[in-house]
Image: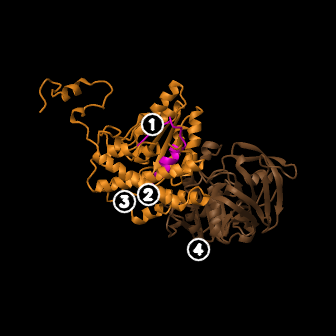
């Protein structure tokens, strides 16, 4: 039976202002194209594979398809290109019904967009973004091989994946409620507008909720990670609020060191943090601010209540290394 | 004049006003051109307003900008007077270039506007020169070059960025990627998918922002200006935007469909910024409508005044072109050819 693999390569990932304001590395589209080529080569580890590629407006996907190995059937997803995050969501919605596994090249934002609509299809997420929490910087060939093994059923999905948590957000303004979804982190920032989207100044952070935390992660999950470690598949999450200058706190804040952006080791005062149960609310009253979702400013808020809660219904993320080791244990790399 | 500082509500309203002024000015210019009332070509900035206004809102008033053939928006964003711009479009003596430059050459050095330019990619070398001047004189001004996606492939643009990067000059290079170099889609002009990737070749920061969001352009240029003013050298910014009109008025636009244009109009920079200001309570719908009506009238008045203004006197045809007298031109204008013969 043919194994169908979806491929999302976000041409916009890894090119934001943090190349100026932080130590973020450059991820150009030539590198993405080469990585995607490696993914396609890795997929040939299993027989009878076809690949569906998300189209884009930059020509990147065209080149990936043109450069694909001859023995691999590669086609575009039939969809309208909008040159925005909607494309990743639309492609993932198609893959939810038509793919056995999906490979995503992008950052936290791209993986979140895919997660919104991918359902239970296993996702291999390769980092090409800036300072990513969810995707890992893995070689494309290795990632492609893992996707092929999981997609073909050679390694069972249940044993190859972990269910990542998410964060649900209600932004309540008078009688209007807007619902937003984050994957790893949602923050409340004291900034007037979305602007270049990146979180430029750690002193803007008011607080947030993360579905995972570790001091090895960069950004909001790193701040929470200085206090408590929360695995991506642990139910619930961590909510925290920073002490703000001029505000009296009931208890003395805890000072935490955290890597907030690449090249920046920050010291922040945490006024409060709490490990949250699944679907437990953590709220902020916001006069003027911006909500960041997975490291990017996304939504401007005026005079509203922001209610955040961790929800354990995220994407099934493939553990690349354990898939390949499991396959090797079963002799799939031995010939004869 | 209200300071263009979009960190403040007054500044946000002024930014909205300037974007609306650009749109009204260029929409009127399109009508005038189609009615045959304007001499020369016009290239319109409709759709790209957030780039010019966002960038200029991040600059200091004595900073310099260089422009392109699509320069009306840059002029208005930098604070030039629409009356004098319209007079220039009509070729009248009270225009910015005394009626001798037209749409593609509007300049006002005192305002820091070093000129629109009919030559693709001619702005960045001027910006590098202005930045070098600032550096040599020990001034704290910064020069920003607006240029298009087509210009990125021009040799002199490479030379300008390379020199500014090598000498760490206080410049900002801002590409307005409006998706087409004349009739050629950007992906058919360049072998990189993001034009900001070319910054790597100069060892300077390069990144891409949403050119339909004035706050993104503002913030990007503000950071780049700070780097330039701190002596750390230039930054390369790509603003992704879209022109709603053709390359020039009269362009049949066989290279794109109405659906292509509609996708970008859905993200219209003015509409989205207005919505955000209304949401934040910085302006009401009624105040916005009033602002639009005022601007419409201002542009109509500018046209009326331009039509009534005098053309330059033919006897001044050879003035305003060079700082020092050029003998050949003096001879020619007095009826004598350089070789001693008489002009016919």
Pointer 1: what residue? B111
Contact between marks 4 and 2 (CB within 8 A): the answer is: no
**4 and 2 marks on the same chain:** no
How far across and down, in percent of the image, does residue A78 sit? Answer: 50, 70
Residue A68 seen in this snapshot = no
Q: Earlier in the sequence, mark 1 or mark 2?
A: 1
Pointer 3: what residue? B255
Mark 2: which secondary structure?
helix
Pointer 4: what residue? A98
Residue occupying image coordinates x 52% and y 30% = B167
Q: Is residue B162 left or right of residue B316?
A: right
Pointer 2: what residue? B293
Q: Which region shows up in magenta?
A: B46-67
Q: CA distance from mark 4 to mark 2?
A: 52 Å
Q: Which chain is brown?
A: A
Q: Residues within 10 Å of mark 3 (few under 14, many from 20)?
A: few
> In front of the other: label 4 or label 1?
1
Q: Residues within 10 Å of mark 4 (few under 14, many from 20)?
A: some
> In front of the other: label 1 or label 2?
2
How far across and down, in percent of the image, does residue A274 sit? Answer: 83, 59
Q: Which chain is orange?
A: B
Residue occupying image coordinates x 82% and y 52% = A271
> In front of the other: label 2 or label 3?
2
Which picture quadrant has residue B123? top left
């Amino acid at each position: 039976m043919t194994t169908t693999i979806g491929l999302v390569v976000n041409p916009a990932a890894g090119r934001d202002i943090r190349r100026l304001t932080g130590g973020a590395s450059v991820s150009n589209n030539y590198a993405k194209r080469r990585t995607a080529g490696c993914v396609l080569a890795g997929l040939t580890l299993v027989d009878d594979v076809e690949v569906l590629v998300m189209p884009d407006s930059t020509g990147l996907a065209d080149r990936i398809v043109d450069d694909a190995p001859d023995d691999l059937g590669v086609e575009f997803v039939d969809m309208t290109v909008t040159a925005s995050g909607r494309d990743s969501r639309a492609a993932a919605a198609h893959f939810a019904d038509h793919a056995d596994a999906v490979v995503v090249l992008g950052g936290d934002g791209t993986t979140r967009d895919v997660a919104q609509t991918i359902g239970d299809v296993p996702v291999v997420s390769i980092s090409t973004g800036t300072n990513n929490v969810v995707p890992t910087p893995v070689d494309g060939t290795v990632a492609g091989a893992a996707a092929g093994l999981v997609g073909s059923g050679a390694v069972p999905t249940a044993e190859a994946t972990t269910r990542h948590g998410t964060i649900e957000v209600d932004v309540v303004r008078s009688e209007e409620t807007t619902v937003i979804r984050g994957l790893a982190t949602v923050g409340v920032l004291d900034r007037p507008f979305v602007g270049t989207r990146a979180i430029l100044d750690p002193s803007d952070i008011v607080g947030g909720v993360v579905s995972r935390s570790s001091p090895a992660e960069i950004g909001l999950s790193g701040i929470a990670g200085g206090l408590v470690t929360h695995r991506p598949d642990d139910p619930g999450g961590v909510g925290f609020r920073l002490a703000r200058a001029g505000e009296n706190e009931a208890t003395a804040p805890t000072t935490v060191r955290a890597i907030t952006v690449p090249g920046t080791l920050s010291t922040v005062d945490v006024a409060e943090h709490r490990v949250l149960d699944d679907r437990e609310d953590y709220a902020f009253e916001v006069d003027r601010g911006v909500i960041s979702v997975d490291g990017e400013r996304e939504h401007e808020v005026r005079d509203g209540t922001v209610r955040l809660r961790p929800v354990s219904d995220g994407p099934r993320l493939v553990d690349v290394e354990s898939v390949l080791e499991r396959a090797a244990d079963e002799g799939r790399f031995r010939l004869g | 004049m209200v300071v263009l500082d979009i960190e403040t509500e007054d500044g946000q309203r002024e930014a909205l006003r300037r974007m609306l002024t650009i749109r009204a000015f260029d929409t009127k210019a399109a009508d005038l051109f189609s009615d045959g009332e304007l001499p020369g070509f016009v290239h319109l900035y409709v759709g790209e307003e957030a780039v010019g206004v966002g960038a200029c809102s991040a600059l200091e008033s004595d900073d310099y900008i260089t422009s392109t053939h699509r320069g009306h928006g840059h002029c208005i964003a930098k604070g030039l007077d629409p009356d004098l711009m319209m007079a220039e479009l009509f070729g009248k003596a009270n225009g910015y270039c005394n009626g001798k430059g037209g749409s593609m050459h509007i300049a006002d050095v005192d305002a820091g506007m070093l000129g629109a330019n009919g030559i693709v990619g001619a702005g960045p070398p001027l910006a590098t020169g202005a930045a070098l001047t600032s550096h040599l004189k020990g001034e704290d001004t910064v020069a920003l070059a607006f240029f298009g996606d087509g210009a990125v492939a021009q040799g002199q643009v490479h030379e300008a960025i390379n020199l500014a990067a090598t000498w760490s000059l206080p410049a900002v290079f801002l590409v307005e990627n409006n998706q087409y170099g004349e009739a050629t889609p950007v992906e058919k002009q360049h072998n990189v998918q993001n034009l900001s990737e070319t910054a790597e070749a100069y060892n300077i920061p390069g990144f891409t922002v949403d050119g339909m969001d004035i706050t993104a352009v503002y913030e990007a240029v503000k950071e780049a200006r700070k780097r330039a003013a701190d002596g750390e050298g230039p930054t390369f910014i790509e603003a992704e935007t879209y022109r709603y009109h053709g390359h020039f008025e009269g362009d049949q636009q066989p290279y794109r469909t109405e659906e292509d244009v509609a996708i970008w109009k859905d993200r219209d920079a003015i509409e989205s910024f207005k919505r955000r200001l209304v949401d934040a309570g910085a302006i009401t719908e009624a105040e916005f409508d009033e602002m639009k009506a005022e601007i419409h009238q201002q542009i109509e008045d500018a046209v009326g005044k331009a039509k009534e203004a005098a053309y330059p006197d033919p006897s001044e045809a050879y003035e305003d072109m060079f700082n020092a007298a050029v003998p050949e031109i003096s001879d020619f204008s007095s009826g004598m050819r350089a070789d001693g013969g008489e002009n016919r």
